[in-house]
Each structure stands twice: as structure tokens, then as C-alpha cells.
Amino acid sequence: MKVNLLNCADYVTSDVLPFKPDVFEDLNMEPILSVMSKKDKFVSQACKSILLAPSGDRKNILYRQQALKEALEHKKDIFSLYVTVAEVYTDLTNYRSRTKKEGNPLPAVRVMNSIETLDLLSTGLEKLKAVIVDANNRFEPGIFRDFFEAFLLEYDSSFMLLVHEKCQALRTLQVGGEIQLSGRIGRGMKCDDLLVNSITEYRVKRKFEKWDSLFGAKLRKNEIRISYDDLQLTRDCKDLESTGLLHVSSCFEDFNKDLSRLFENLRTQLAFFYGCCNLHTHMTGMTFGLCFPEIAEKSHAIETDRMYDLSLAIDTLRAPQSNSLRGSDTLLYIITGVNHGGKTSFLRAAAVAQIMAQAGMFVPAKGMKTGIFRGIFTHFGRNEDVTLNSGRLEEELSRLSRMIDVMKPGSLLFLNESFATTSENEGAAIADDIIRALTDNKVTVFFVTHIYAYAKRAYRENYENTQFLQTERNERNERTYRIISGEPSETGYGMEMYSRIICGTE
């Protein structure tokens, strides 16, 4: 049975985030995962892998949004489902770890392992079925309800009865049962096309039954009786027995793999919903705004209402300064202003919101409307190469070059103080060449920069499809940490600080 709670079709590996480790580090996403996982390592890993694989398909994003909305309305049921599946899978993993130490087991041992695995899985199915039956009536018709009904149809009472019967039949082998096989002689005089006809429980025969067996044997003229005094025939019989047992084991191993895959897929997908419920509860408990974004069909415009830096909010337990954004046909956002004025926080907020939107999640904002980008890239500063094989500028350009090599039209790039490790004139020339080439190829760029010469030139020459944003300062010339529209401003206030701190003047 396929588990399609996250995807409306079979899962396709996403390439929207080609440089996942860089994005995760640049955007400081660890606090988000910490809240989602609640110290559950599997939930953390599952949420990270799904969050960092945003979809490029609008239909799939809307499908996941709908599933997540249903999950948020029934958080207790989601927790129960995840805990039940996680317990079954943990028991199964622990059992496999123990049996793996046995190396290459004998055929009889493999059959016993198959029995134990089937027993664990069938018991797990019963537990999960009970939770699903209990939750089914509380969910409105939708994605989860469809899954529940498909599950109950697939694993109905007749199926569970069949599983228990097969499990009991196999258990007869533990006390000395008999397997009746049929087949044919294949290549190399080996058995081929084996078929298990029956597995019967061993029982001690009474005296008259033994006489009947001996009398019946004389009547069966085509039956071959093997004397175990013949060592070669004994070995051949043992080989035949092993072949039969391996065949039985392989039949049930395939069945066990299918059921194991069901629990594995369900555990991963439920872990993501479980993590989203944890994050939603945490943020709404602190009265921070969250919303499901509207996904535009064709436009790449980004519009936000009171968007904030999610990781900063989690770390500080306070609502950071929020910002609104109106994108229309903008391809280039140039953000300037004083240090520690909120520029990097604004950049992270926009990038995280877009990734969460394309992952089908809610976003840290009061409202958001955005399109679908074919690739999302971040380029933040790094420490200088400790091996001294390259300087800061060379490292930055090499890293950006690798991104451009895989970048497609319709991508989104976040540059944070790039090209600032050379002179201002050289940095302005480099930035102008690279960013013009990107926007000409329909790549949307957010550029936080201290290169005033570049920002001033872009403003003076009125670059097409460009918005100019800057950090706000109030009437007392203090930072407000808001980002507003406005002409590029000088990024340093050194003389002001000198006068205030050293000279003691205001």
C-alpha cells in the first residue's frame, strides 16, 4: 500500500535546493528543527529532509497544505498515530539489530526470523488499525480520511485472519512440523519452481496409526523410501530440506519487506506532520503570527504582510521586528543601511518563508502570496580559508560560480554582503556584472550590501524591475530594525558614534 499523505503522486526527488547544507547554515534553521523534533532524532532528520526538499509543483504544494491543515485540526490524533508507528518500527529495528549479529543464519533460523518479524508486523498492524478506527470518524473527508479508509480496506479482518493463520502455520515448524513441497528438477539437478503445498503440525502417532501408515506405504508402489544409512542420500535430503526452508523464508521475507516499507514510509511522513504540529503549537502559544501562503500560478512576485525571522523568534522568545514586502514584477531587491539594523534578519526571514511555502507548510507571517521558484540559493559570508589556499573573495566567487552552474531561469538567490572583501569600486563592478547577468536570465535576487557605490549607481540609473530597501531610523536616529522602501543610504555611522561615545555629544 502506498502512503501519499505528503504527495499527491509518487514522491519525486526535488532539486529546488541543490546546496542544502549551505542553505541550512546560512539561514540558521537549527532552532526550527529543535522545536519541531522535541529532541526526537528521527523527527529531526525527517523534518530536515522534507523541509530542505521544497516542491516545484503547485498542485503538490496545495495538496500538502491541505493535509497539514487537517493535521493541525487533529493534533492529538497525529501524535497517537506517530507514536504507534514509531513504537512498532523501533521494535522491528531492535529485533533486526539482534538477528544481524548472527551473520549468515541457517535456513531453519531464517524461517524462524521470518516468523518473528511477521509476528511483530502483524501485532503492529493491529495496534495501528485500532488507532485509525478510533481517529477515522473525527476527520472530515479529505486526505487523511482517504488514507484511513484505504488502509482499513487493504488490511481488513479477512486479511488479518489470513496473516494470523500463516503465522500459526509457520510456528508449527518451531516444534517440529512437516512441509510438503512440490517442484521440478531444473538446471544442475537442482529443485526449481518450488511450491509449498502444506505445513502441518507434528504429532505423535498412536500404534494403530503407525500400522495403518506401514500398510498404506506398501500400497503406494511409486513412493521412494530413503534409508538414512546412505550418507550421500542423507546429505541430499538435508539439501532438499534446506532448499524448501529457504523457499518458505523467501516467500515471507518479501511479504515482511512490503509491510516494513509501509511502516517506514508512514513513520517518515507522520514525523513531518508531528513536527509541524509541534512548531505550530509552540509559535501560536507565543501568539506569533502564522499563515498558509497563497501560491500564485504563474507570477514570481513575493508579497508578505508582517513577515519575521522564525529562528530569531524561537531563540529570543520575543517577536522580532516584522516587515512587509510588495514584489509585483521585481527581479532585484537592493537592501542597504547601517550594521545591525535588521538586514540579515530580513533576508533570512524571506528565504525561510519561501522554503517553507514551497514545502507546503505555514509561514512566519500574517499573510503571504508568492510564486514557485525553480531553485533557491543562499550566498552568505564564510570565514577565510584556514589553509590559506584562497582568500575571502576567491572563496566567495568560487562558491557563487558553482551555484550559477546549476541555476535556472525562475530561480531565487539571496546574497548577504557578497563581494565586500575587495575595494568598493572593484566590488561594485563585480556585483553589477554578475547581478545584471542573473536578472537578465529571470533570476530574482535579494542583495544585502554595504557597497554604496553599486547601490547608488543602480538607483541613479533607475535599474529596471528593482526595489530599493533600507534600514529605518527614527527621529532620534536610532535603529528600529524595520526595512522600508527608500533611496540607498550610507552603511556606516562611525562619526555619529565617535561624537556620541568619545566626544560625549549628541
Image: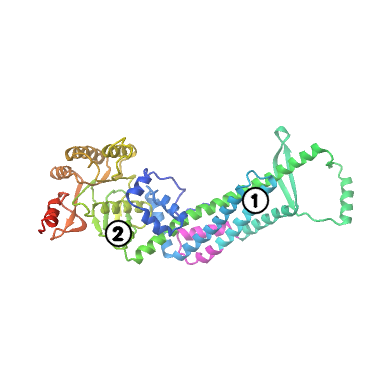
**Residue drawn at (19%, 44%), measured in percent from left and top?**
451
Left or right: 54 as drawn, with respect to 255: left
- Checking the image for residue 113, the label placed there is 1
Q: Which residues are magenta?
A: 130-156
Circle 1 residues within 10 Å: few <14, some 14–19, many ≥20? some
Secondary structure category for the residue under label 1: helix
Q: Is residue 352 visible?
A: yes
Q: Is 222 or 430 nearer to us in this picture?
A: 430
In this view, the residue in front, 232 or 170, is 232
Report the amino acid beneath label 2.
Answer: Ala
- State the predominant SS element of the stretch in magenta: helix
- Vertical placement of 70 versus 224: above or below? below
Q: Could you tell me residue 184's position as x and y percent?
A: 73, 38
Which residue is painted at 16% across and 38% down in the image?
425
Q: CA distance from mark 1 to mark 2?
A: 52 Å
Q: In the image, what residue occupies the spot 76% across and 54% down?
A: 201
Q: Amino acid at mark 1?
A: Asn
Mark drawn on residue 365: 2
Density class for disc 2 (Cα within 10 Å; few <14, some 14-19, many ≥20) is: many
> Residue 369 location in percent, x, y?
29, 55
Left or right: 340 in relation to 108? left
Number of the label disc, if any, that sits on residue 86? none
Whether residue 455 sits left or right of residue 319 in the image: it is left
Q: Quadrant of residue 390?
A: top left
Quadrant including the C terminus:
bottom left
Q: 386 or 136: which is nearer to us?
A: 386
